[in-house]
Image: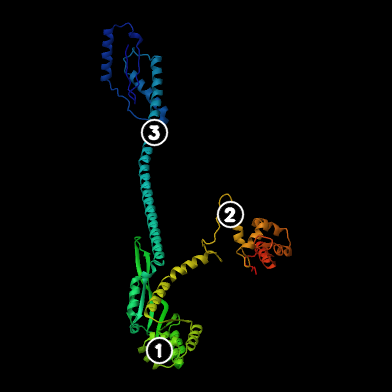
Amino acid sequence: MTEIVVLSDSNESVLSLENDGLKNVDEGSRKKSFHRSSFDLDTSEFEFPEVQFYHASDTEKLLELQNNSIRASLSTFPPGKSPKVHSSAVSTNTNSKKYNVKKSSNRMANSSDSTKESDEERTMREKPKVTKTVTKKARNQITEERLKRQKQLGREKALKAIASKKSKNIKPGECLKFMEVVLDKNIESFGCINEIVSILLDANVQYSIKKELIPNSITWKRNVENGYVDSDNEICTVTDIENVNQIVIIWNWDKVVTEVADGSFCTTIFSIKASLPNYSILLVIFGIENYFIYSKQVKNPGKNGTKNKHKKAGNASNHEFKNYPQISKEQLEMCLDEIQIIAKCSSRLINNSQELAQMIHQCTKAIAEIPFKMEKNENLTSKFDWYVMGDNRNTVSVDKNGNGLKRLWQQQLCQFNLSSLEIAEAISSVYKCPADLMEAYKNCTQIEGQNLLKDIPIRRAAGPLTATRKVGPELSKKMYIMFSSKDGEIILS
């Protein structure tokens, strides 16, 4: 049996050809014939078909080329010894065809799969880059938002610190530290400058002595700390000087006596007010009491009381009073009333340097507390049209069991004008709570409601001899209006 091997494009197809005439030939002759046949194959001009690769769509051409290659190999055998192709070879051929087609189709599928895989790998390689860049951008955005939030929180914290510091600076315990008292140089002639300076230093109040526009005047300045937040959330403070529109003018008794006697007292004050239209003026008259003691002694020299007061005043001052005109205390009071009504100028009579120093300290403290009191008043008036101060006086405690409700109801009834504790006890004995009184008013007409409480008896004390009286129509009408009216602006009386 001779086997001929045919190489296909896949190098895997084998064709077996069996020779019927050589069945009884021994093994040596078969080897000899095989060598001769192989020699003939080598010496002949047989050439293998050109190996070409085809796609799955060219299956018909591939089968035709394989058949041609088989015929060419068979034609190389010598005459009379043509081999017969068995069915096994044909089946092998067909199987090889099928295998080759399947192989090519599998190769195409593998190539397409490989291309798909390469595309997927490329996309998978590119996707992480995108996700990495996206995550990087998201991280940067998150960090930026976090920084902005931290910056905003820091700014809010700084603003709260500024507000708390500002509110602390205007409180009564701290406000005096930011005040400055400006004293005119002419005040030194009164001989009380040392007392004024010492009391201001004890109160931690700054002061300065300089020449002012109005002689013998005292003015005030307030150092206001204004804070703001810069771009780095740092608190910066700027101190502004605010001039207070309050002025104290000190006149000695001799100037006052001369001005009142000449009739120019009010005119001088009016001119000062015209030069300071926005200022509140306080006129202090220093040492006028001794002058009135002397004038009273001159009018009534025989009275012992005036003689003793005259001795206390001293003989040196008496010689000073003699050189000035005589005015009465009533004349001075008339002038003071006139400047208070027309020029809105207050006045105060002070007789010694200690009272003057104490008065300046009191004025300084009152002026320093003005911002605090104004802010407190604004907070109260901005919340309610009317308000009740939150004092803890005359309060009634009520426990969880209801003990104290009757006393609270009586306390509410005592708030009415013309009411008292006896009247409240009489009304609460008939109507135990406000709900009972409201229910009674609902079942009455207007006239009946106004007269509902007027006949309730009031006992002032226990015993048969005690007199009784009634609530009366006026209070009964007020209470009816209070508990039945829907208009909050109505007047009770």
Q: Are marks 2 and 3 in contact (CB under 8 Å)?
A: no
In this view, 174 is above or below 22: below
Q: Secondary structure at mark 1?
A: helix
Q: Are marks 3 and 1 in contact (CB under 8 Å)?
A: no
Quadrant hosting residue 26: top left
Label 3 Cα neighbours within 10 Å, binned few <14 / some 14-19 / many ≥20? few
In this view, 116 is above or below 333: above
Quadrant hosting residue 275: bottom left
Q: Which residue is mark 3?
A: 113
364 or 113: which is nearer to us?
364
Left or right? Give the position of 33 relative to 370. Answer: left
Q: Which residue is mark 2?
A: 404
Q: Position of residue 340 (x, y in %)?
A: 49, 83
What amino acid is found at the position of numbered circle 2 in the picture? Gly
Q: Secondary structure at mark 3?
A: helix
Q: Secondary structure at mark 2?
A: loop
Mark 2–mark 3 Cα distance, whole angstroms, equals 93 Å
Q: Quadrant of the N terminus?
A: top left
Q: Position of residue 107 (x, y in %)?
A: 37, 29
Mark linked to residue 255: 1
Q: Nearer the viewer, mark 2 or mark 1?
A: 2
